[in-house]
Structure formats: C-alpha cells, structure tokens
C-alpha cells in the first residue's frame, strides 16, 4: 500500500500532540529559516517557499498562542504556515539529548561504503563525499553542478541502497512520493534542520533521523534574522536518532 503525504503529516502532528503543550513566546523568520521559541524549548525549520532572491514575505502567526495551535499549519504544504508548524513540532520533539551526536554526512559515509547512494537535496557536503561510493547521485528540483533533476527520481531511487532525503520534503508535499519509489530493503534517512525526531516516521520506512537541537535560542534566532544558512548558525547541536531496530 502506498504512503500518502497526508498520512505522514497526520502521524507527525499526532505524535507531537501527545507531548505537553507550551505557550509560544517568540516567532522569527529569515530568508532561509524560521524559529519558534516556547517557554521551555525552541525549534527551527527551513523556510518555504524558499526564494533567496526576494525579500522576506509572509505574515507570522499572531501571538499569544501555543505550540499545539501552530501544528495544523503543516497541512498547508509549501507555505510559511507549514514552516512555523514544523518548527513547532521540532520544538516539542527535538529536546532530548541523543546518544549519537553526529552530522548526517558522517552516517552517510559510514553506511554507504561500496553502495549506491542517492541524496535528495543539494547539501553543502555533497561535493566532498561524491567519490566515496559505488555510485552517487544528487537529485534536486533546481539542479546545479553535478546534480540530476528531480524528474530522474523514478529512474534512480529503485537502484539506490541508501537514500538521504532533505526534510523540506515534509513541507513541500513530496516526501510520500519519494518513499514510494525507494527499493524495499533500502536504508532511508531524513536530514536537515527541518527534521523532527518523530518515531512514527519509522512506520513509513525511514531508518534514521538526522536533525538538530537548539541549545542557545537567542544566538540561533539572531542568526536566522540575519539570513544565515543552517551550517553558519551557532548554538545548535547536530544529532542522529534511529527510528527502530536498524540495519547496517
């Protein structure tokens, strides 16, 4: 049975709703990222729709409100509301310290040795690791350098042993379609600043969640308002969480 985007969104929101609610005290947005500050934690997320060539647009939700009240915005895919909603999910779920403090590229290198590896989304590290695998493909809606266009997904994904997917696919409506193209038995990872530590994603076939935790909210939010990209932010911790008993 094929996975639907609505099923993914419903389960992620549902898992977040099982956790305690908190009042939202601050919302910030830049050209690349948004942030949500609550009484006891903070969360960040990529900003969609993303167009770095134009000034910031979009109305932030009005305060006061709670984290749970932001969550329905995730259903409005490819909107600023979806970005704030997923940042709220991350504020709720990405608070516990993981035993695996590492970056996504480190796990890709470890698990991808001798394998066919596909990365969906042009991350800054891809040019550094592109020669480390049997085959390596980067698929992107707006391809550059050695990227392949996303129209190649149906041809490439069934051949890949390891698939690392940008978590912005949770925001733009494309994650379900990607997962449905992956070969049975392949290792799948969701990664990037938008990644929620939602164990329900394991039910969708995702094995690893590579995201971040906000340690110093004001430092992070200052960077967001200055339009810094994720890798330039200070005050975040990178970590990886398996969703279940995983294969190596």
Image: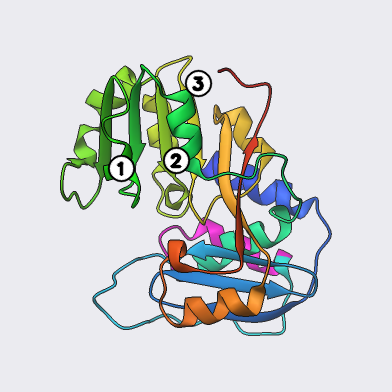
Viewer can see residue 146:
yes
Span shown in magenta: 68-79
Q: Earlier in the sequence, mark 1 or mark 2?
A: 2
Circle on res. 41: none
Give how far across and how far down residue 58 sits, in percent: 42, 80
Question: Which mark is in front, 1 or 2?
Answer: 1
Within 10 Å of disc 3 (Cα), the crowding (few <14, some 14-19, many 20+) is few
Task: Say which residue appears at 68% left-offset and 26% top-offset.
Answer: 244
Q: Nearer the viewer, residue 215 or 185?
A: 215
- Looking at the rendered image, the quarter that the C terminus falls into is top right
Q: Percent x, y for residue 204?
A: 56, 30
N-term-proximal mark, 1 vs 3: 3
| Residue 3 seen in render | no
Q: Is residue 162 left or right of residue 10?
A: left
The residue tagged 1 is 128
In the picture, measured across the screen, residue 242 lies left or right of residue 122, that is right
Residue 57, horizontal then vertical, whole percent: 38, 82
**SS type, badge 3:** loop
Residue highlighted by disc 3: 1
Does the CB distance between marks 1 and 3 fall below 8 Å? Answer: no
161 w.r.t. 84: above or below: above
How far is disc 1 from disc 2 in space, using C-alphas? 10 Å
* Other residues around mark 2 within 10 Å, as few (<14) / some (14–19) / many (≥20): some
Tags 1 and 2 touching, CB below 8 Å: yes
The mark found on residue 105 in the picture is 2
């Amino acid at each position: 049975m094929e996975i639907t985007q609505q099923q993914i969104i419903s389960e992620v929101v549902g898992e977040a709703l099982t956790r305690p609610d908190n009042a939202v005290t601050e919302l910030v947005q830049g050209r690349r990222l948004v942030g949500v500050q609550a009484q006891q934690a903070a969360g960040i997320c990529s900003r969609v729709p993303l167009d770095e060539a134009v000034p910031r647009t979009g109305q932030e939700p009005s305060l006061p409100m709670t984290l749970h009240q932001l969550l329905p915005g995730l259903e409005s895919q490819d909107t600023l509301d979806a970005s704030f909603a997923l940042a709220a999910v991350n504020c709720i779920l990405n608070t516990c310290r993981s035993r695996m403090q590492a970056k996504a590229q480190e796990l890709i290198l470890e698990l991808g040795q001798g394998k066919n590896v596909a990365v969906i989304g042009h991350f800054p590290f891809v040019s550094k690791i592109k020669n480390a695998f049997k085959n390596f493909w980067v698929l992107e809606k707006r391809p550059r350098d050695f990227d392949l266009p996303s129209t190649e997904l149906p041809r490439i994904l069934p051949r890949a042993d390891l698939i690392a997917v940008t978590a912005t696919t949770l925001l733009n409506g494309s994650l379900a379609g990607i997962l449905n193209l992956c070969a049975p038995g392949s290792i799948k990872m969701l990664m990037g600043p938008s990644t929620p530590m939602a164990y329900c994603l394991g039910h969708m076939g995702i094995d690893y969640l590579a995201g971040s935790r906000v340690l110093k909210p004001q430092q992070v939010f200052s960077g967001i308002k200055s339009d810094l990209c994720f890798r330039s932010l200070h005050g975040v911790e990178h970590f990886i969480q398996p969703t279940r008993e995983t294969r190596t």
